[in-house]
């Protein structure tokens, strides 16, 4: 492989990243995928271009390691570094990992002239593990269930258990990093576990476009059709990328009809619901919507906590529940960001040889937390305390008196007095129009008990840390 020139400091950054991966990954994975990589680091460190030997490996690196490499580079350099993956023969830089918005994406056109020279195909030589392009780590077992994904997950499990029947096609949509890709891989992996002979293919929509282009160029549409039309299960990710690709849409339509006719199953993902798709033919859109369409929502707090704890465990690290709560409270947007936060915390903990604690998490995530520039409001306190003690926010204002509710409410009043500038009557007002003496009683009671009860003190500590960010 060509050695790509890079400056010394840049080389140092790349080598440190590789070294860290060498420690983190199983030896065989490291030797197969990471060791052969070369990289070029921009003079100002703004971008690292990693060169990969062929398109197939590039896809694999992108799917499996790009987020991790980008995260490590950022940890090591101290600021975000754009990561680009490119084929080693330089003439065709494929796609940056840091994704632009859909409209700006540099996807291959499906006109023959714009075809990439080495577009991938489902037939490309590969070891049997990769032939179906499934990542065996993405299973139902490793996908944490919560309200946000319950329906999508159970529909997907249903499909995996009896493909070709209900919910065909299954159309899963949702924002970035919410687990759509994970879920479709899980369907494929589950089906293969039950029926190892099933013909399953996972493919990203962009790759399908490339396959169409190649069939065009080589006049191999018969083989193309045979390959796609013979599947038992087609898992196709990010179908919004079919926008404006007329020939691809036509071929996908054909494949779709053929597969449904023979009771094969199709599972699709997209960033929007079918009717929200732009520049896709109406006849395709209506077919996308003809089975079951389900959304994946951003994960709720408890799900985020569970994901963090599970992922830490998978990395052989312990994340105490209070730290997971602190992180989950502060990183809300999607699971990929949660994973990024976890990676930072674990790297920080290893590097400084300190145990994972709220204090450590706060240090590791200080950039992220300072961006949020949180202002503590009484509403925020009520929500956080309600989440922590697993009661409804509405109970903060209600007249209910059971201790399981009254106590968290007193704790929230105490924190409101401690962490905001509000007066006792103002706080009373915000807790369902209570008298200021009720608030005063709560504040005094909790302050006194805090001195006596270690457990309460610890809980208050977690809540304070969480609220202060
Ligand atoms: N419920 C979950 N439990 C465990 N891990 C999850 C869950 N949801 C998402 N993840 C993890 O979060 C990361 C991002 O998920 P995934 O790539 O499936 O998102 P996506 O919705 O396909 O995003 P995009 O649209 O950006 O491709 C993956 O590493 C995935 O394993």
Image (cartoon, rainbow, N blue to C red):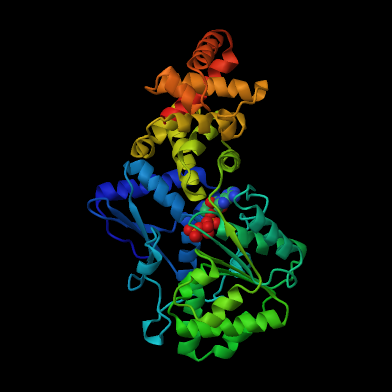
Residue 273, compared with residue 282, is above or below; it is above
Q: Quadrant of residue 2?
A: bottom left
Q: Where is residue 327? Give x, y as percent.
A: 49, 36
Horizontal side of residue 256 vs 160, given as left or right: left
451 or 268: nearer the viewer = 451
Residue 104, compared with residue 8, is above or below; it is below
Give the residue displayed 61% in from the left and 54% down from the top.
Answer: 137
123 or 403: nearer the viewer = 403
Give the residue displayed 63% in from the left and 47% down from the top.
Answer: 146
Viewer can see residue 343:
yes
Viewer can see residue 29:
no
231 or 153: nearer the viewer = 153
Give the residue displayed 33% in from the left and 61% down from the top.
Answer: 3
Direction left: furthest residue: 43
Q: Quadrant of the C terminus?
A: top left
Horizontal side of residue 211 vs 235, given as left or right: left
Q: Where is residue 231? Give x, y as percent.
A: 67, 77
Q: How many numbered discs sit on the rendered protein?
A: 0
Q: Where is residue 362? Give x, y as percent.
A: 42, 31
Give the residue displayed 51% in from the left and 67% down from the top.
Answer: 238
Q: Where is residue 192? Give x, y as percent.
A: 71, 64
Q: Quadrant of residue 66?
A: bottom left
Q: Quadrant of the N terminus?
A: bottom left
Q: Quadrant of ligand 1?
A: bottom right
Residue 316, compared with residue 249, is above or below; it is above
């Amino acid at each position: 492989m060509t050695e790509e020139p890079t400056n010394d400091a840049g080389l140092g950054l790349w080598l440190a990243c590789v070294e860290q991966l060498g420690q983190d990954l199983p030896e065989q994975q490291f030797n197969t995928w990471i060791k052969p990589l070369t990289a070029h680091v921009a003079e100002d460190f703004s971008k690292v271009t990693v060169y990969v030997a062929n398109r197939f490996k590039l896809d694999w690196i992108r799917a499996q390691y790009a987020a991790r490499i980008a995260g490590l580079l950022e940890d090591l350099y101290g600021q975000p570094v754009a990561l680009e993956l490119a084929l080693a023969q330089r003439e065709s830089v494929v796609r940056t990992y840091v994704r632009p918005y859909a409209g700006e994406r540099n996807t291959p056109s499906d006109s023959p002239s714009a075809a990439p020279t080495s577009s991938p195909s489902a037939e490309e030589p590969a070891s049997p593990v990769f032939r179906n392009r499934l990542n065996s780590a993405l299973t139902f077992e490793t996908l944490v269930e919560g309200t946000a994904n319950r329906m999508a997950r159970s529909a997907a499990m249903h499909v995996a258990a009896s493909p070709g029947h209900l919910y065909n096609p299954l159309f899963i949509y949702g924002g970035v990093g919410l687990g759509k890709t994970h879920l479709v891989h899980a369907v494929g992996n589950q089906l293969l576990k039950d029926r190892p002979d099933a013909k399953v293919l996972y493919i990203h929509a962009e790759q399908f476009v490339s396959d169409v282009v190649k069939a065009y160029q080589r006049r191999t549409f018969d083989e193309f059709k045979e390959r796609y039309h013979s599947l038992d299960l087609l898992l196709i990710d990010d179908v919004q990328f079919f926008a404006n690709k007329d020939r691809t849409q036509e071929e996908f339509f054909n494949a779709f009809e053929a597969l449904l006719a023979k009771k094969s199953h199709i599972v699709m993902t997209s960033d929007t619901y079918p009717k929200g798709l732009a520049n896709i033919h109406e006849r395709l859109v209506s077919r996308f919507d003809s089975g079951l369409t389900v959304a994946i929502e951003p994960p709720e707090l408890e799900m985020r906590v569970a994901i963090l704890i599970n992922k830490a465990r998978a990395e052989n690290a312990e994340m105490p529940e209070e730290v997971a709560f602190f992180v989950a409270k502060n990183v809300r947007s999607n699971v990929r960001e949660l994973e990024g936060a976890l990676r930072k915390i674990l790297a920080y903990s290893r590097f400084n040889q300190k145990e994972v604690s709220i204090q450590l998490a706060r240090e590791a995530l200080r950039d992220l937390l300072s961006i949020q520039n949180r202002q503590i409001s009484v509403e925020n306190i009520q929500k956080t305390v309600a989440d922590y003690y697993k009661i409804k926010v509405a109970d903060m204002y209600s007249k209910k008196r059971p201790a399981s509710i009254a106590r968290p409410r007193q704790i929230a009043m105490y924190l409101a007095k401690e962490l905001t500038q509000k007066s006792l009557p103002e706080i009373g007002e915000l807790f369902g129009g209570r008298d200021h003496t009720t608030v005063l009683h709560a504040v005094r009671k909790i302050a006194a008990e805090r001195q006596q009860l270690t457990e309460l003190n610890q809980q208050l500590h977690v809540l304070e840390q969480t609220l202060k960010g």
